[in-house]
């Protein structure tokens, strides 16, 4: 038995950190949506009791450290599954980029094996299991637009935002999420209004969404990595409707409604940044330009 599952990247339209909890996790409020940049997960059921994992990407571990492996192991152990699985990951999402690639691979594996192993789990049940693997996995299980709160595992679904293009650029640096959080001083940041962002999405007001984008982690990453700031400025000058860093970075994205302008921005960024993408947000009727 064989199944292909898409694992799309996510971007944060807003990301707020409220405080550090006694359990050392940060209490967050994140509005996230999926974009049309996705890994491809191939799942093949094995009669033997083992999990095989493979990806050609040299930054992705081919063993039990892989989040997709952990997802399969979690389902196997929780439901005493005797069969094994071969997981092949065709990576399109840049690694350690702030786009939740690993979490999305884990979520796609949960969704796929739920079907292949006939577990009949609801999306909520899968998302709760996903939270054991990582805070972003629950959101990725839903594969939509949502408000994620708690440590990121409490999901309130939202309608998809109005149609637009997303231009993404990832500078050739690695950013450790842990380092960014360690350098975060919550008294010294501008908090985005999660409430206003949620309302703007519910009311489908594109301009309001653009004016409400915000990410508290930007202050830290931009200070530590000037190249991220440079890309942000370049996008702002190229006529983006909104520009924001996703997650803890280093990927920066621009929202642009006009296709020709998005294309020009993509071309000019290609000049000095190796990893640039122009994609659409997922999950709405396509009426662009
Ligand atoms: P987040 O936004 O959730 O912090 P990210 O996009 O910054 O995630 P990932 O691409 O998920 O980061 O990768 C972070 C690390 O996780 C990588 O350095 C890699 O070693 C490890 N990893 C484990 N499994 C995977 C996977 N399936 N794909 C990519 N990275 C993985």
Image (spheres, rainbow, N blue to C red):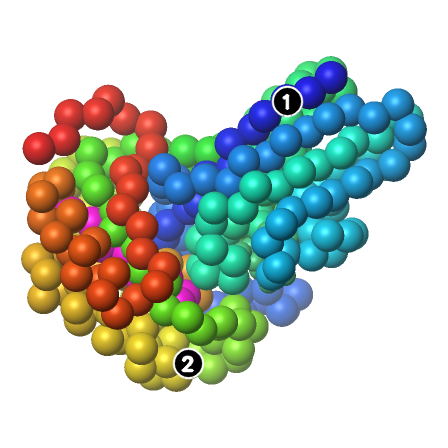
250 vs 3: above or below:
below
* Quadrant where the N terminus is found in the figure: top right
Query: How many numbered marks are there?
Result: 2
Q: Which residues are magenta?
A: 249-256
Residue 42 falls inside the magenta stretch: no
Disc number for residue 285: none
Q: Is residue 176 above or below residue 41?
A: below
Which numbered disc, 2 or 1, marks the residue that appears first in the sequence? 1
Q: In the structure shown, which secondary structural element does the residue marked by tag 1 occupy?
A: strand
Q: Residue at x 22, y 65 (%)?
A: 271
* Residue 3 disc label: 1
Q: Is residue 227 visible?
A: yes
Q: Could you tell me which residue is drawn at 44 percent across and 73 percent down? A: 173
Which residue is found at the position 46% from the left and 34% from the top? 143
Element type at marker 2?
loop
Q: Residue at x 41, y 33 (%)?
A: 144
Instruction: Examine the image and state in which quarter residue 131 appears.
Output: top right
State the mark number for residue 185.
2
Residue 81 horizontal/vertical position (percent): 86, 27
Residue 242 point in image, percent of width and height: 17, 55
**Is ligand 1 closer than 8 angstroms to the Cβ of mark 2?**
no
* 256 to the left or right of 88: left
Q: Confirm whether the magenta stretch covers residue 251.
A: yes
**Left or right position of 150 against 286:** right
Main SS of residues in magenta: strand
């Amino acid at each position: 038995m064989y199944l292909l599952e898409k694992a799309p990247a996510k971007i944060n339209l807003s990301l707020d950190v409220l405080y550090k909890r006694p359990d050392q996790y940060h209490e967050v409020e994140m509005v996230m949506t999926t974009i049309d940049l996705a890994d491809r997960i191939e799942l093949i059921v094995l009669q033997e009791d083992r999990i095989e994992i493979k990806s050609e990407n040299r930054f992705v571990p081919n063993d039990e450290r892989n989040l997709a492996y952990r997802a399969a192991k979690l389902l196997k152990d929780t439901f005493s599954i005797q069969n094994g699985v071969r997981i092949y990951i065709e990576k399109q999402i840049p690694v350690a980029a702030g786009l939740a690639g690993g979490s999305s691979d884990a979520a796609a594996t949960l969704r796929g094996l739920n079907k292949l192993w006939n577990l009949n789990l609801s999306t909520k049940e899968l998302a709760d299991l996903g939270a054991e693997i990582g805070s972003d996995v629950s959101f990725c299980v839903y594969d939509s637009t949502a408000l994620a709160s708690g440590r990121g595992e409490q999901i309130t679904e939202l309608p998809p935002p109005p149609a637009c293009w997303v231009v993404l650029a990832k500078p050739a640096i690695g950013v450790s999420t842990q380092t960014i959080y360690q350098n975060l001083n919550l008294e010294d940041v501008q908090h985005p209004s999660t409430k206003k962002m949620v309302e703007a999405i519910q009311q489908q007001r594109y301009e309001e969404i653009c004016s409400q984008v915000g990410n508290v982690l930007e202050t830290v990453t931009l200070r530590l990595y000037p190249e991220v700031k440079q890309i942000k400025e370049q996008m702002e000058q190229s006529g983006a409707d909104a520009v924001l860093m996703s997650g803890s970075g280093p990927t920066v994205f621009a929202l642009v409604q006009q296709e020709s302008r998005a294309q020009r921005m993509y071309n000019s960024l290609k000049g000095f940044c190796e990893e640039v993408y122009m994609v659409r947000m997922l999950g709405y009727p396509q009426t662009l330009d």
